[in-house]
Amino acid sequence: MFYLWPTLVRRHWPKTTRGEGIRPVFGLLLGIAALGLASCARAPVVDPPVAVSVTPSSGSGATYSFTAVYSDGKGAANIKSAGVLINDELSGVSSCYVMYARAKGALGLVEDAGVGFLPLGSDAGSKVENSQCTLVGKGASAADSGSELTIKGTVEFKREFGGSKNIYLYARNVEGGETPMFPAVGAWLIP
């Protein structure tokens, strides 16, 4: 079969550079699959985790203490990472983005550029900050219970980050399933 493959493709591929040759080759590939000489495997279906809720979902103030709950059908331990994104747009850049990374066993903040992770220290007096907010260690936690992961945290917003912000929830499981982050699940007004 594989020895004949180059011959079959050359024989059915027209001499053109405009893309019209794709149809005959596609038909040839379908024919080969129909004869059982090759198979086309489907990608496995991955069930994403679910962003259940964030409390409070709205309010105002220079400090925001939240509880975010996520769920996964295979259990909370199947959730690889989860986050609470606070920004005026759906972007981790220049945002207050609290993230839980199970592999690191830590809560932290995403850096200003939207890519790095600043982990929170293990003691209650620790703090970590970016240009938009400070994540406070006191009361911060991530805990599994059955199929649910609960994240608790408190952020203190910087004055320059003031204004109306949306709250988005995100989670990713070990299979690669992700929650859709849109639409926003809440709003916070920063003075």
Image (spheres, rainbow, N blue to C red):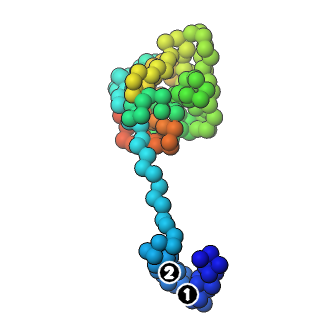
Name above or below for residue 161 compared with residue 48.
above
Question: Which mark identifies residue 56?
Answer: none
Q: Residue at x 50, y 43 (%)?
A: 176
Residue position for label 1: 12
How many neighbours does mark 1 have within 10 angstroms: few (below 14), some (14-19), or many (20 or more)? Answer: some
Of residue 143 and residue 129, the one placed in the foreground of this image is 143
At 56% across and 39% down in the image, what residue appears? Answer: 93
Q: Name the residue at 39% across, 28% down.
A: 147
Q: As drawn, is 50 to the left or to the right of 3?
A: left
Q: Tell me which amino acid carries mark 2.
A: Leu
Q: Nearer the viewer, residue 92 or 22?
A: 22
Q: Amino acid at mark 1?
A: His
* Left or right relative to 7: residue 188: left
Observer able to see residue 132: no
Label ID, residue 28: 2
Q: Mark 2 near mark 1, Cβ–Cβ under 8 Å?
A: yes
Q: Secondary structure at mark 2?
A: helix
**In this view of the protein, can residue 137 be seen by the observer?**
yes
